[in-house]
Amino acid sequence: MHLFKNRAADPDVLVGFSDGMNEHDPEDPGFIPNVSIKYGHLTDEWKTNGTRNDPKKESYLYLSHGDQANDCAYPRHCAVGSRRVVREYALNDGQGGQRRFGLRYRDGRYDRRGYGFLGFGARILTDLDTGATTATFYDNETFVSVGERKVYPFAGQVRSQWRWAPALPNEPNPSRVEMAFVDIVADVVPTNDGRTYFALPTKRHTRRMQGAFSGAGSLEAYAEGVAANENATMLRDTTVDVPAFDEFGNVLEVDVSTVGVDLTTHITRTVKNDVSRWILGQPQWQEECSSATGATQCRTITRTTNAYGEVETESTSSSDGIDDTKLTVVYERDKFGNVTSRGCGRCIRSSSRINDRLR
């Protein structure tokens, strides 16, 4: 047996690609790949080169313990090493240039007892041309019992996201910053008597704000302060709740409300799950009601499906019973499931269609 050792500093990785939509061939002088990729290593430069109050701390590619609340105590461990991650990528803008994006990572964790890599606690994506940034936070901490075992049910799932976009150079108000914050709450739903499970988001809180950045400190620190203290002009504060869902994760009820707006929306659904054929998530009935100024109006959709989960009829109506809001559509299909004709009651037209493959 002969063993060949790769002496390269790093393994081969994808650094770019292009497709047939590129206006140049690779050998042309003006060729720019559709996507170009640069890499860095999962080493914590702040640990080795930084200082306690390092002003460059936010700019480091990776911080293994950026969130002090996300500890590295056994059985979890801070992920640090030579593993390569994407540092920057650029997209061909179709005009002879590129749009460049930079990435930073925070709080990678893995479990020493066999659960493996649990993902990062945060990933920060920045548009290097405009400064617009999206910070996405993940839950690699929650460890709960499901049935007879313990799991990390939310590993790799988003729990919150911050977005901020500073004013462009040609804008009249250079200190303006647009921000959006999303917080997500998820539930763990055991299935098969606890042998399996799924995680379902049951609450989504969205806030949009506009503030003024004085230039003191970093824009990232300013956005973090606004997320915590709401010390900026609130443009929208909306909450979406999911109070009911079935054992397959189909959402059965939704409530939507916005602070300061006299409008709420409540949606109720009935979903058919054909377990014998494993055709799940077939909406059969939905009522969407909006309430404002003490009045409530509802819109109802009713569907019937065949044994293959294909829609046969669909009817819509409103709570006031007006005929003009009522519509029933009947679909006819061929043996392949293609719609060949569509007829409707209480409407002024119908149509038929024969699939091109059958002509």
Image: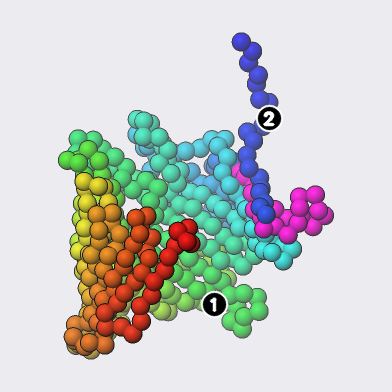
Which residue is drawn at the image coordinates 49% and 53% (left, top)? 123
Residue wearing tag 2? 8
Residue 42 visible in image:
yes
Report the side of 238 relative to 267 (left or right).
right
Measuring from the top left, give residue 260's x and y in whole percent: 30, 82
Could you tell which of marks 2 and 1 lies nearer the N-terminus? 2
Which residue is drawn at the image coordinates 73% and 55% (left, top)? 32
Measuring from the top left, give residue 334's x and y in whole percent: 35, 59
Tag 1 secondary structure: strand
Q: Amino acid at mark 2?
A: Ala
| Foreground tag (2 vs 1) | 2
Magenta region, main secondary structure: loop
In the picture, the disc for residue 176 is: 1
> Residue 114, located in which quarter of the rendered image?
top left
Which of 223 and 306 lies nearest the eye of the viewer? 306
Disc 2 + disc 1, Cβ < 8 Å: no
> Residue 234, located in which quarter of the rendered image?
bottom left
Which region shows up in magenta?
21-40
Which residue is drawn at the image coordinates 66% and 79% (left, top)? 170
Tag 2 secondary structure: loop
Measuring from the top left, give residue 147's x and y in whole percent: 19, 39
